[in-house]
Each structure stands twice: as C-alpha cells, then as structure tokens.
Amino acid sequence: MNSGEIYKSALEISGTHAERLQTALQKLQHLMPFKATTVKNLNELDFLYLELFSNRFAKLQDYMGNTLFDLCLVNAGDSVDGMTIIDKVNKLIKYNLISSEATWRDFRKARNHLAHEYPAHPELTAKYINETINLADELLKTHAKIKIFYWARINNYLEQMR
C-alpha cells in the first residue's frame, strides 16, 4: 500500500466514525439538553443511540490522535519521530487544523468522562453528556479540516506531476 492508499483508508475509517457520530447526534436531538430525569428515563432505543454517540466520539477522537495526526504531519513533510501528542497538536494548530491545545484536552477529558458510568449520579452523567455533545461539533469540524488539508495537498502534488 502506498502512502496515498494508507491515508485514503485512514480517512475512510475515521469517516465511518464521524458519520455514525453524526447519526447518533441526530437521533438524540429530541433529548437535548440532557437532564438527570432524561438519563434516568431513557428508553432502550435512546440508550443505544447514547451508547453509539459515546462510542463513536471516543473512537473518532482516539483515531485522530493515534493515526490521522501522524499521517497529516508526515504528508505535510514533518517528522513525527519523538513528538508527543501535544507537540503534534501544536504543529496542527499552526496548520489551522485544531483550534487550540485546550480544545484537544477538552476532547480527551470528554472522552474519558464518557468511558465511566455514574449510575448513582444521573445529574453528573447528564452534565458530561451535554459537555460532550457541545464538543462533538468541534471534533467533527476538526476531522473535516484534516480531510480538506490532505486532499488539497494531494491535488497540488498531482497538479505538479502533470
């Protein structure tokens, strides 16, 4: 597999996560903003969409940090050897792909909060769900920026080859 195929495959995988995250958001729209009573009274289908939302937010955030960031930076001609995730984030901020280091940390915090359940504290669960829903749009925008960045670079390369 050449680098273009690798990146295309990575974008397909992350695209699946993004599409399913968007679907979950649409299906949960009627419950927003979540309240403690909403959390306590979820029907089975809404619970499953909440699980889909939680799962796909985490998968997209992880996949971006573990795979797409490296591919994006390498595609831009940067070396990722020895770089921490914060180093990568700061480099991506310079490319205008991530709005801030704090945003990335917020994505991580939200992902970690969703990984834990608080059955005795539905108000806490509702709070974390609402925070993550508010961040989901920014995560999806970041993913879209990375896709655009990559395809623009590929198109420029192809133009130069003609």
Image (tube, grey):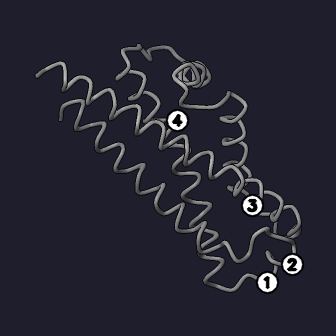
Q: List x then y, in percent, for residue 58.
A: 58, 51
**4 or 3: tag closer to the N-terminus:** 4
Q: List x then y, in percent, for residue 151.
A: 32, 35
Question: What residue did someone put label 4 on?
Answer: 65
Q: How much space separates mark 3 and mark 1, taking CA atoms?
A: 15 Å
Where is 149 relative to 137, above or below? above
Question: What residue did someone put label 1 on?
Answer: 41
Q: Mark 1 touching mark 2, by CB under 8 A?
A: yes
Question: What residue did someone put label 3 on?
Answer: 129
Q: Is label 4 in a helix, a strand or a loop?
A: helix
**Quadrant location of residue 36?**
bottom right
Q: List x then y, in percent, for residue 156.
A: 27, 24
Q: Residue 151 carries which label?
A: none
* Tag 2: amino acid: Thr
Question: How many tags in the picture?
Answer: 4
Q: Mark 1 touching mark 4, by CB under 8 A?
A: no
Q: How much space separates mark 4 and mark 2, taking CA atoms?
A: 34 Å
